[in-house]
Amino acid sequence: MSDRVLAEASAQIAAARRGERPAPVVRTFFDEKTFTATHVAHDPVTREAAVIDSVLNYDQAAGRTHHDEARRVVDYIRAEGLKVAWVLETHAHADHLSAAPWLQAQLGGKMGIGAEIVRVQDVFGKIFNAGTEFARDGSQFDRLFHDGDRFSLGEVQVTVLHVPGHTPADMAFVIGDAAFIGDTLFMPDYGTARADFPGGDARQLFQSIRRLLSLPGETRLFLCHDYKAPGRDCYAWETTVAAERDSNIHVHDGIEEDAFVQMRCDRDATLSLPNLIVPSVQVNMRGGRMPEPESNGTRYLKVPIDTL
Ligand SMILES: [Fe+2]
């Protein structure tokens, strides 16, 4: 199963590299507050586009949302005359709120995420003691993706890979010769994503990463985050399979699974939780929507005490 999916994705990448199929144009918007890269990929022929991992601005102290980041994306899409077919999430993020429903209202398109989101909804639905009005069936999204799913963005082929480990639901969207790999690998000088959130698994993360690194060396990789590695003074979010295999500080070729798992678990034990994990998870498990308003018309987020 895995081999077939990887073979199809690899053939798709090779066809785009050879110019037999269009390769997507990618434009990235980087939110320096949450270190998140939102990517817009489009087919240069039909101008059909996908937005991947959008950001809703959230002022935690004031409990206020705004749309400055997402508006940059909307302005670009309108200026370029793109038609949004998909608003995608690589996973339910724990460090920023998704602007997917707001973008969908502005631009159209279908919201999609990995099918394992139902497991994430189950875990966090319990942690936040969400009521029965919170459906744990993924119905907040238009499409739930499985490993090996394929579709087209205009004339560009897309293959979806399930890459769990950071969370159970992580997906990589391989669009033409460009793979949007969410929180798996970071830039070679920074390493890999943490695997200690509920449902995370360092061993699974290693296997997912090795799977991504089995794609052709010239595959363009687009990351969800960058934090600037020591000695690097600009943000970066694009690399290649070959560069990661050669020099990723956590998983370059030759690093064995057990050594990675040990390193990852040791490092995760030193990391504090992301600033916005409490609001992010509550909103993102609902597909980027706030909880329903209470009887006074106000929406509230909860803070579980001594739980996370
Ligand atoms: Fe994440």
Image: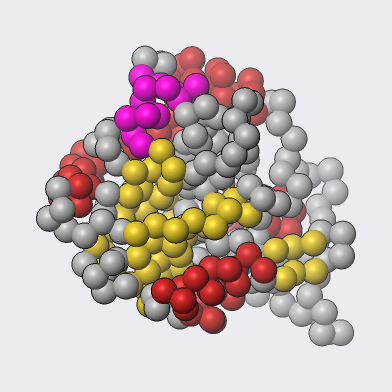
Q: Is residue 75 left or right of residue 148?
A: right
Residue 26 is situated, as x and y percent measured from the top left of the image, at 39, 57
The quarter of the picture where the C terminus appears is: top right
**Residue 77 or residue 93, whichever sits in front:** 77
Q: Residue, x 21% and y 39% (percent of image)? A: 3
Residue 92 is situated, as x and y percent measured from the top left of the image, at 56, 55
**Residue 78 or residue 103, whichever sits in front:** 78
**Residue 126 or residue 152, whichever sits in front:** 152
Q: Residue, x 52% and y 32% (percent of image)? A: 192
Q: Is residue 147 visible?
A: no
Q: Is residue 56 visible?
A: yes
Please give the range of residues in magenta.
240-253
Q: Residue, x 41% and y 50% (percent of image)? A: 180
The quarter of the picture where the N terminus appears is: top left
Classify residue 242 by image quadrant. top left
In this rendering, is residue 162 above or below 69?
above
In this rendering, is residue 186 above or below 129?
above
Residue 124 is situated, as x and y percent measured from the top left of the image, at 65, 54
